[in-house]
Image (spheres, rainbow, N blue to C red):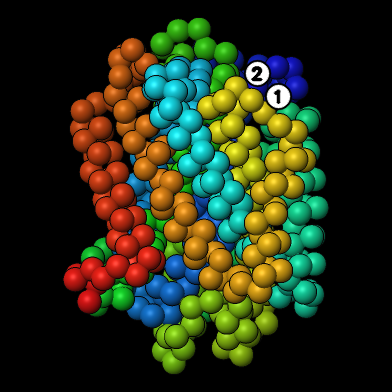
Amino acid sequence: MNDDRTMSGRTRATMAAVIGGERRGPLAFLAFVGPAVIASVAYMDPGNYATNIQAGAGYGYTLLWVVLVANMIAMLFQALSARLGIVTGRNLAELSRDHLPFPVVLAMWFVSEIAAMATDLAEFLGGAIGLSLLLGIPLVWGMAITAVITYAILMMERGGFRPMEIVIGALVGLIGLCYMAEILIAPIDWEAAGIGLVSPDLPDAQALTIAVGIIGATVMPHAIFLHSGLTQNRAVLHNDEERRRVVKISNTEVVVALAVAGMINMAMVMMAASAFHNGHAEVAEIETAYHTLTPLLGAAAAGAFLVSLIASGISSSVVGTMAGQLIMQGFLRFTIPLWIRRAVTMVPAFAVVLAGVNATQALVMSQVVLSIALPVPMLALLWLIRKPEVMGSFVPRQATLAVAGIGAALVLSLNFVLLASAFGFALPFLG
């Protein structure tokens, strides 16, 4: 990752000056921006749209606090993943391969590959749904256009990671602008939103189910793997003091990037609360939300919704493919041409559509698969990050590890609830 193709000489010089303590300030910080922005795409992918729409339509602003909690857990785990890559110069998949028995590594790789394919199914379908609705074309055509665009973006990596990071950052910015427009168009009850953000409340069993969906499907397995890979060897580091500087910069980027992702998710909930809660609480699907928005808030709001969905689907599909490559290379020391990987991960999406499966239902099922795979990176990261032989003096403080353990227990417990509900097991506290 650290050859002459990865970044310009000016960027490399700026990073070296910052690491050496010779330059400071926001402009110098920009040289390091990229990994957290790419990872943040996982937290505003098409899978989030359905849960956020359900939360806002069904319960107004009441479940905004759930989005906040989910975002804070995501920040912690992405920061730990980035720290692992910076300190060790290795990614999570590589370290798991080196420190765990081979049968466990093989099982981890298999589960993680399935998760990467499920992720790509969700992202790919999301972009295709948006294009189909925006342009009035069949869903299969939308999928074909999405495939071409995502492959073109992936090919930018041949010129280094900077061009791809800029494109992904621009798509994230477009999503943010769309939801800023939505907030300005929709009549938001800011007082109710503020109360919902700081007042934990689950009015009934269905609210608990939606909360489980928001938290349980927020921390993405592929994003945890990918972030460590994006930070490994990104800069040449000679000693622990330089590593500390880069870890500090990385933590700042994680907080800013995921705060933006969190605000976009909150904006989704608030838009749905404003548009659908009174009179259209049954809205739960992306297509229904689009068709309902037009008469309620106008064509501009509906158009902004679709543009954001397309940007989300395309950017997250690119990121999902990148993660799949890193997972295979890290676990097996084996890689395949990008076009083959892109083709293979597209097959399930085309199969789902051609089989007549409801696209939104396919998105939901992909989240179930991700829930099954989530313990793999979360538990591996927690196990490795606390080992002095891996992290040296960079083992996080006990308080940080304790909070991470609590966050993992919460997320994995809620994933269990989500899976039990998805497979039809009756849980008493879900009513």
> Label 1 belongs to which residue?
6
Q: Residue at x 76, y 54 (%)?
A: 147
Please give the residue where the numbered disc 2 appears in the rendered image. 2
Near mark 2 (Cα within 10 A), the count class, few <14, some 14-19 or many ≥20, is: some
Residues at marks 1 and 2, CA–CA distance in whole angstroms: 6 Å
Check the picture and name the quadrant holding the N terminus.
Answer: top right
Residue 426 visible in this rendered orientation of the protein? yes
CB-based contact (under 8 Å), mark 1 and mark 2:
yes
Name the residue nearer the viewer: 48 or 373.
Answer: 373
- Assign the C terminus to one quadrant of the image: bottom left
- Tell me, yes or no, if residue 180 can be seen here: no
In the figure, is residue 376 to the left or right of 38? left
Looking at the image, which is closer to me, 185 or 84?
A: 84
Residue type at mark 2 is Asn
Q: Secondary structure at mark 1?
A: loop
Amino acid of disc 1: Thr
* Picture coordinates of residue 340, whole percent (x, y): 75, 40
Element at label 2: loop
Rendered residue at 68%/82% (across/down): 299
Q: Is residue 133 above or below residue 26?
A: below
Quadrant of the image occupied by residue 319: top right
Disc 1 packing (10 Å; few <14; some 14–19; many ≥20): some
Q: Residue at x 37, y 65 (%)?
A: 423
* 342 over 419 or under it: above or below: above
Q: Nearer the viewer, residue 166 or 135?
A: 135
